[in-house]
Image: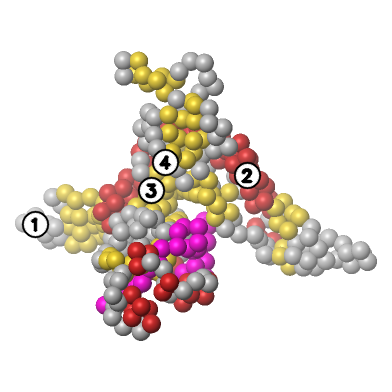
Amino acid sequence: MTHTFHPYRTDGDRRIVATEAEWLEIEDLNRQAQTAKCGRCGSEYDIADVPEEEWPFECDMREEDGSPCGRVNEKPKPIGVIVDAEMFDWWDGWLFNADGKQAFWDTDEWMPHCVAGGPYLEMDDVRNRLFKLIDRCPHLRWMLPTNYPAEAFKSYPVTWYRGELSPVLTPPSNLYLSVRVANQSDADRIIPELLRIPGNRGVFLDGQTEGIDFSAIKLGRDKTGQETCDVLKGVYTVEYHETHEYPGGIQVLDGGPRIEGVTQRGGADALHPAWVRQTRDQCEGAGVPYAFIGWGEWIPWTVDARNNFDFDPDTFSFMCHLIANPNGDVRQFPTSGQKACIQLGYTTFKKDDVHFVNVGPARSGKVLDGREWEGVPE
């Protein structure tokens, strides 16, 4: 199970901070994740009171006639929370409370400061509240996506440093700092930066424009050779160049820093199913939890979609249709061939083409190959 949390929402040049109810909802989720409920008698148990080796857990509560319940219950799956907001950029715009009262920045000789007469909020206030919420909710699995992993490292609170003489940053074990990736170039650029940061790591595929191969992320290159990494397995490969002094060769190192979770969703553009399956299959092959949280604006008009929608796409305007293939070639549905393509089973399509219909993110769902994928790190 995954839940999306917005500490703020963007409205033009303003950021609207989440309501108090939205912050409290996350704490309710933490209590829910902390509790296991018997499927027979309904008794509730604190997960922390049941040792890991005793799961599946046999309920020992008594029925009305005095007999034991005896139902064997599986350990509940963890709940993941995706922080869907950029928390580590250099924002100097306006912040507003949910009731519309402004909490904005003013400038004095180009030095931003909070205007007197508050209560005015700064991004640091929102960040600090989020960090405190993460500390108060240890039973959730937090996915914290960002485009700036180095800035995230600098923004972590001092309470996450352990040790007296030489404090070491030790982020909470249930926090997964994730980088936003849309294409292979993004992956090669930002994932190496993430691997240098301590703690758990993840990838958030958002607005993807091509398939992404995680098995050979380029980490660095110099005159001696090229280093690549299968970031889902933590296998590092260094290929040394042959020179007049050295014969060259390949060195493989296992057990290095890796990615522990991948989350994927569509955006305003069509997300080709081949890209989604490629990511899912890579994660399954490496034993990495994988979550697919939605197709976005455009849904592939496949058997899954036909079974879940009660409208005929033939009645839709041609502006609501797209044809796309895995190489990123996207074209508007041809008006003259619209009915023919649908009725003839897409016989006019090229190989690997997929027909997309614009239904909006609220209706597109998250079904892939007949089921939902909600992997959350244990």
Residue occupying image coordinates x 42% and y 66%: 299
Q: Residue furthest right?
A: 65
Q: Residue furthest left?
A: 244
Read off the residue under disc 2. Answer: 25
- Amino acid type for the residue under numbered disc 2: Glu
Q: Earlier in the sequence, mark 2 or mark 3?
A: 2
Q: Nearer the viewer, mark 4 or mark 3?
A: 4
Read off the residue under disc 1. Answer: 243
Give the camera-side residue of 156 and 204. 204
Q: Are marks 1 and 4 in contact (CB under 8 Å)?
A: no
Q: CA distance from mark 2 to mark 3?
A: 25 Å
Read off the residue under disc 4. Answer: 86
Q: Which residues are magenta?
A: 350-377
- Amino acid type for the residue under numbered disc 3: Val
Q: Nearer the viewer, mark 2 or mark 1?
A: 2
Read off the residue under disc 3. Answer: 179
Disc 4 packing (10 Å; few <14; some 14–19; many ≥20): some
Q: Secondary structure at mark 1?
A: loop
Residue occupying image coordinates x 52% and y 19%: 118
Q: Earlier in the sequence, mark 1 or mark 4?
A: 4
